[in-house]
Image (cartoon, helix red, strand yellow):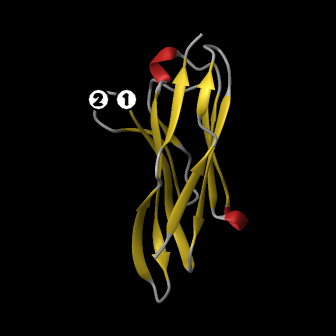
Amino acid sequence: QVQLVESGGGLVQPGGSLRLACAASGSIFNINVMAWYRQAPGNQRELVAALSGGGSPDYADSVKGRFTISRDNAKNTVYLQMNKVKPEDTAVYYCNIKGTYGLALSFDSWGQGTRVTVSS
């Protein structure tokens, strides 16, 4: 089993910055995809940013130029740096990591969610 623990959410003013972190633990053999999703009240969960293998990161159009996804392979951790945040960024943010563990068994794990509120 692979478990994810998120941290870094909270209240931030419009135009401010926040960094989310998601650490994976377990007998991880390989990580293929690390991603952040978010879900605002009344909305469906949407992809915010994703990193796959050695490729370039993908971002939702609404966060391009403001958010940056990065990873620390040694720590099995993915980050989301959120800059110039807007009220419409208010949501619960979830990390999602896909890969293999143990004897090459695949996993698709989700974090518990961390709430981000952008308000003055």
Which residue corresponds to the image point at 53% horizontal and 67% vertical from the top-left? 31
Give the SS element for disc 2.
loop
Give the amino acid type for the residue marked by disc 2 in the picture: Asn
Is 107 above or below relative to 39?
A: below
Residue 60: % across, % down: 44, 32
Q: Amino acid at mark 1?
A: Ala
> How far across and how far down the image is residue 77, in percent?
64, 58
> How many numbered marks have been drawn onto this rendered protein structure?
2
Q: Residue at x 28, y 35 (%)?
A: 44
Residue pointed to by mark 2: 43
Categorize mark 2 by other alpha carbons within 10 Å: few (<14), some (14-19), many (20+): few
The residue shown at (72%, 67%) is: 74
Left or right? Give the position of 16 relative to 46. Answer: right
Q: Quadrant of residue 37?
A: top left
Q: Residue at x 55, y 53 (%)?
A: 55
Res. 6 visible in picture: yes
Please name the residue that numbered disc 1 is placed on: 40
Q: Do callouts 2 and 1 mark residues in contact (Cβ within 8 Å)?
A: yes
- Whether 92 is drawn above or below 79: the answer is above
User: Closest to the observer: 98 or 39?
Assistant: 39
